[in-house]
Each structure stands twice: as structure tokens, then as C-alpha cells.
Image: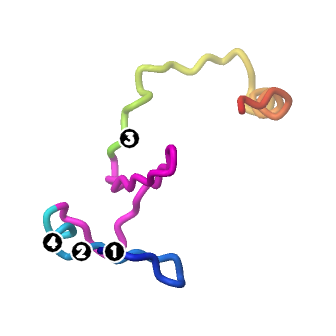
Amino acid sequence: MPTLSSKRQITLPKVLCDRLNLKPGDCFSICEHKGEITLMKMIDGSGWGVLRHLNAKDVCSDEESLLDALENPQV
């Protein structure tokens, strides 16, 4: 059973790494929900094109957009 080290590291079982093709240096997204942790391997290029259907509108400059975001945070 994997345990948390004093450096907050977890060693994944080799069988699991082999089955999921995990390699040293792979990046993960970590999500916590109701006390459970989920690791998701980040895949290069997986987000490419996700927002391509959105078209930018020239209704405000980058500076105006930044100032608006700072004044009206979407927390």
C-alpha cells in the first residue's frame, strides 16, 4: 500500500505505472473533493482546440479586460 513520505511523496506501484504508461516526469492534475484525492495524468496537447469555437470580439482592449477582471473577480 502506498504511503505518504516525510517529503509528502507517494510511490505508485510499478504494476500500475506499467498498465497506465506512467513515466518519471509525467505531470498530473490533483483534485480533492469531500476528502478524496484524484490524480489525472496531463497529456500534452489534450486541451488543444477545446475553446476554438469561441471567437474573440474587439469590444475592449486587453487592458480594459484586465481592469474589469480585477474590479469584478469571479470567485
**Which contiguous range is marked in magenta?**
20-45
Q: Position of residue 30 (x, y in %)?
A: 46, 55
Q: Which residue is mark 2?
A: 13
Q: Which mark is residue 15?
A: 4
Is 1 within the magenta?
no
Residue 41, given in percent of the width and then of the height, sits at 33, 56
What's the distance in space between the residues labelled 4 and 1, CA to CA?
Answer: 13 Å
Q: Residues within 10 Å of mark 4 (few under 14, many from 20)?
A: few
Contact, CB < 8 Å: mark 4 with mark 2? Answer: yes
Q: Disc number at residue 47? A: 3
Residues 29 and 32: in front is: 32
Helix, strand or loop at label 3? It is: loop
Residue 61: quadrant of the picture = top right
Kindly identify which residue carries mark 1: 2
Marker count (numbered):
4
Q: Residue at x 74, y 20 (%)?
A: 60
Amino acid type at mark 3: Gly
x and y percent of residue 15 in the render?
A: 15, 72
